[in-house]
Amino acid sequence: MRHLKTLGIALLGLALSGCGYNTIQTQDEAVTAAWSEVVNQYQRRADLIPNLVNTVKGFAAQEQAVLIGVTEARARATSIQVTPEMLNDPAALAKFQAAQGELTGALKSLLVVVERYPDLKSDQNFRDLQAQLEGTENRISVARNRYIESVAAFNGTVRRFPVNLTAMIFGYDVKPNFTVENETEIARPPTVDFNTPPAQPAEAPAT
């Protein structure tokens, strides 16, 4: 009897493997791992922002609108509760993406403002923070791309016959992904060229 039970479990394992169950499990774990890295890098960026804002404020306190904009965008981005369920909720993922995109835009505005303050651009603390921010933005881009690829692989598997039957039986469905709309713009790291002098106003023609 025990041998029959063992044989039954072995046959069940082979059946599940043959119908793609193991592949689904592996790819589902890969999606979760890729998502964790996305979240980690966005959190790394959020952690840099308070010091960045305070440093800019020390040299350009009059830029209140931009400073407040970055602070509020960070607050909105970090207020979204990141849970595993978000991976299966298109509306939640879209909300998360929109908030992070808004923060990216606010940071770009802040770094553009910096061009008007040579003393701030030459401050070593600011330069270090800006370098860390650019590095983090690059890591965000890499992490997002890996997540996009992981979700695409998972979705392809659960749509493909006969694995789609296994996915349906065990309750697996396609996962939402980052949208491609404005993907390049959202993922592009904010850059500031410290070696480019600010544009000088054109001289009035001699009379």
Image (tube, rainbow, N blue to C red):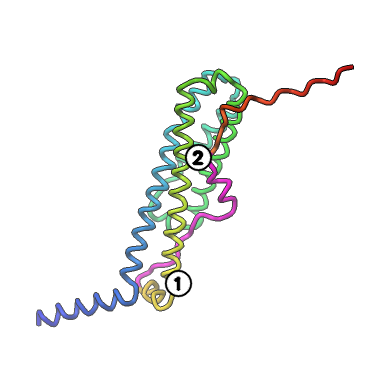
Q: Estimate how packed mark 1 is, as few (under 14), some (14 to 19) or many (20 or more) residues with alpha carbons within 10 Å.
A: some
Left or right: 82 as drawn, with respect to 4: right
Could you tell me the amino acid type at mark 1?
Arg
The numbered disc on residue 76 is: 2
Q: In which quarter of the image is the C terminus?
A: top right
Determine whether 184 is above or below 149 in the image.
above
Q: Quadrant of the N terminus?
A: bottom left
| Residue 204 locus on image (x, y percent) | 82, 20
Residue that mark 1 sits on: 159
The reply to whether dot 1 and dot 2 touch (C-beta < 8 Å) is: no
Left or right: 158 as drawn, with respect to 3: right
| Residue 175 locus on image (x, y percent) | 45, 62
Determine whether 150 is above or below 3 in the image.
above
Left or right: 138 as drawn, with respect to 61: left
Q: Nearer the viewer, residue 142 or 56?
A: 142
Magenta region, main secondary structure: loop
Q: Nearer the viewer, residue 92 or 112?
A: 112
Give me the C-alpha separation between circle 1 and circle 2.
Answer: 35 Å
Q: Which of 31 and 199 is in front in this view?
A: 199
| Residue 124 locus on image (x, y percent) | 46, 21
**Callout 2: SS:** helix
Residue under the image location 49 percent in, 30 percent down: 130
User: Start and end of the magenta stretch?
Assistant: 170-189
Residue under the image location 41 percent in, 64 percent down: 154
| Residue 15 locus on image (x, y percent) | 28, 78
Determine whether 83 is above or below 72 in the image.
below
Which quadrant would residue 63 be assigned to in this image? top right
